[in-house]
Image (tube, grey):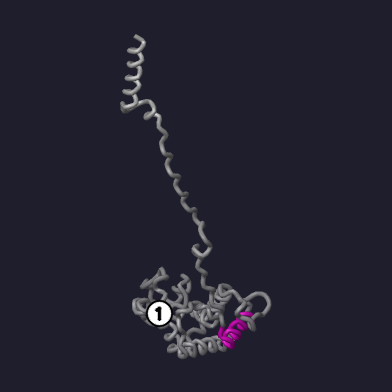
Amino acid sequence: MALSAARRLSSAAGGDAARPGTLSSLFAPRSSPKPRAPRPEPGDGPPQERRKPRARPRPRSRQPWGEEAAALLRRFYDGGYLPGPDLSVAPHVLSPDVVKGAAERFGHDHQVVAKWLSGSDLKKVALFGCPSVERRTVFASKRLRAFFKIQEAKICGSCKMRNSCQFVNQEVSRHDKVILSDTMRILTLFVLDTCPQQLKVTPELKASICKLVKDTINLSQ
């Protein structure tokens, strides 16, 4: 009897070992997942691989027109249009905005001078276009072109600054006179050399501007 019981236990143990799905197979150790590599943060990596910020181009230093700039500023100082010490010998240190304001006030007070200025020289300035895309200067130039009946499309179509101008092809009312405050604002930008670098002032245009400045100074004395 004891022998038969032992045989049954042996048979049962052998059957369990061959049967799939035993407890030992259910609790077999699982392989752990491989850790993911961390994503690189912005700015990580070797210094040579980082993008260097682009250096902004330095603004071009102004080179005022020597004798013409000094003479015009001296006239503004003598008339009380520019305050403070006389800096006509150092026009490059003056703020162009301050000088433009002085030029406009001077023009308002001496409007009569405009009718004696050379029409051919004024027309050359008008045909050049705008020496700046700043609003007041643009419309000063447009009014001068309107006096000579120059179409805006003719000037704006070939302007090198048209992509940055908000007033392309915009017309203004017809004017029956040259407005000296407008003209002085425009001339001042030229003699102070504040025009954008892409605008090329020809020797012929510069000669006309210098003559207009000289005549304005003499006629306003």
Q: Nearer the viewer, residue 54 or 31?
A: 31
The N terminus: image quadrant: top left
Q: In this rendering, is residue 4 above or below 187? A: above
Q: Residue at x 49, y 63 (%)?
A: 49
Name the element at disc 1: helix
User: Residue visible at 35% across and 19% down?
Assistant: 10
Percent of width and height locating residue 118: 46, 89
Residues 216 and 19: in front is 19
Q: Label the magenta part by its dominant secondary structure.
A: helix
Q: Residues within 10 Å of mark 1 (few under 14, many from 20)?
A: many
**124 is within the stretch colored magenta:** no
Above or below for 31 versus 51: above
Residue 116 in view in this figure: no
Q: Is residue 132 visible?
A: yes
Q: Amino acid at mark 1?
A: Arg
Snapshot quadrant of residue 72: bottom right
Name the residue that disc number 1 marks: 145
Measured as percent of width and height from the top left, residue 57 is found at 51, 73
For the residue pair 101 and 96, the one nearer the viewer reads as: 96
Residue depicted at x 67% and y 75%: 84
**Span shown in magenta:** 64-77
